[in-house]
Amino acid sequence: MGLLRKMLRAQPTPTADGAFSPSRLAIKLGTSSTTDYDGGAYPTTYTGSKNRVLMVCTEQRNMTMANGKKFSTGNHPVEMGLPMLHLMNAGFEIDIVTPTGAPVAIEMWAMPSDDADIQKLYRDFEGAFKNPGSLEDFVSNSLTDDGPYAAVFIPGGHGAMLGLPDNADLGEVLHWAHNTSLHTLALCHGPAALLAAKSDAGFLYDGYKITVFPDSVDKQTPMIGYLPGPMPWWVCEKLSAQGVEIINKKADNSAHVDRRLVTGASPQAANNFGRLAATTLLKRTDANS
């Protein structure tokens, strides 16, 4: 099996810090040098005072798998980038935070090198990714009822499972967003971070319908060397146990709105999710501006 995997270039690639990034085969099958970004044109853009989106990113890179091997992850550049482009083109501004203000961890192996829009975005935001705000500081200073925010955005990548699902500050932010009628946006593995909204009173999103990256696909990807071993825990399993209904079966381009929660299924959904998030915010903020 090991020889066959080697012949198929399906062995995960070692990184300098002792982890593994996806194999050549997995990179070929699971990523692209371009995206399906539709250009982000909107007939009207938002011009009111609730014009900011708080993007909560991971600062952790390496995920320890069930077999002890480490996966080099972070936030997926397409799952972060395409929604950012849509939101900005619709008139919103992005504030970037990580739990402590450490740099955003990004899956650079998934960067679409030939996509001019994504490349420009990452050049423009290079400083913000390297020096984001602190989620802890945001909770201490900015949880007001009359702030300039329209939404909280949690981008995907397996890194959304690191340091966010059990983060008390994120739990406070999610409850604040819910209680002040903000929208919450989460894509692919991003919904894993919604688990931070558990409390003694229950789970904030109990009874919600969402789209999310399927556990069934995460269970298959080690075969092509995308992951270096089985996942340490399963996102859909954990969310379902909290009363969430997952409506997609495949890692497809589906996106969904339930009340003020917007979710998307996979990297393939990044454009659809970004447009759905932007149009949903435009409708909501126009009604309240």
Image (tube, grey):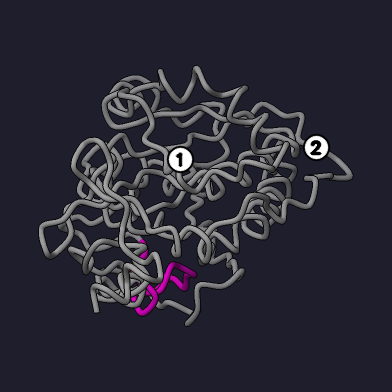
Circle 1 is placed at which residue position?
A: 108
From the viewer's side, name the closer residue of 77 and 23. Answer: 23
The span shown in magenta is 205-217
Crowding at label 1, few (<14), some or many (≥20) Cα neighbours within 10 Å?
Answer: some
**In the drawing, what numbered circle is on residue 159?**
none
229 with respect to 39 (left or right): left
Up-down relation of residue 234 to residue 101 (above or below): below
Residues marked 2 and 1 touching at CB (< 8 Å) = no
Kind of residue at disc 2: Thr
Q: Position of residue 108 (x, y in %)?
A: 45, 40
SS state under label 2? loop
Residue under circle 2?
A: 45
Nearer to us in this view, 136 or 115? 115
Q: Is residue 60 left or right of residue 284?
A: left
Rendered residue at 64%/33% (across/down): 119
What amino acid is labelled 1 in the image? Met
Residue 16 picture quarter: top left
From the viewer's perspective, is residue 268 above or below residue 4?
Answer: above
- For the C terminus, give its image quadrant: top right
Q: Residue drawn at (69%, 34%), measured in percent from left and top?
A: 88
Magenta span has 136? no
The answer to whether one can see residue 251 in this image is yes
Q: Measured from the top left, where is residue 69 in percent x and y? A: 16, 56
Say which quarter of the image contains residue 138.
top left
Q: Residue at x 35, y 77 (%)?
A: 220
The answer to whether any part of residue 263 appears in the image is no
> Which SS does the magenta portion mostly show?
loop
* Label 2 – label 1 distance at C-alpha: 31 Å
Residue 282 position within the rendered picture, expressed as x and y whole percent measured from the top left: 72, 45
Label 2 neighbour load within 10 Å: few <14, some 14-19, many 20+: some
**Residue at image coords 50%, 72%:** 251
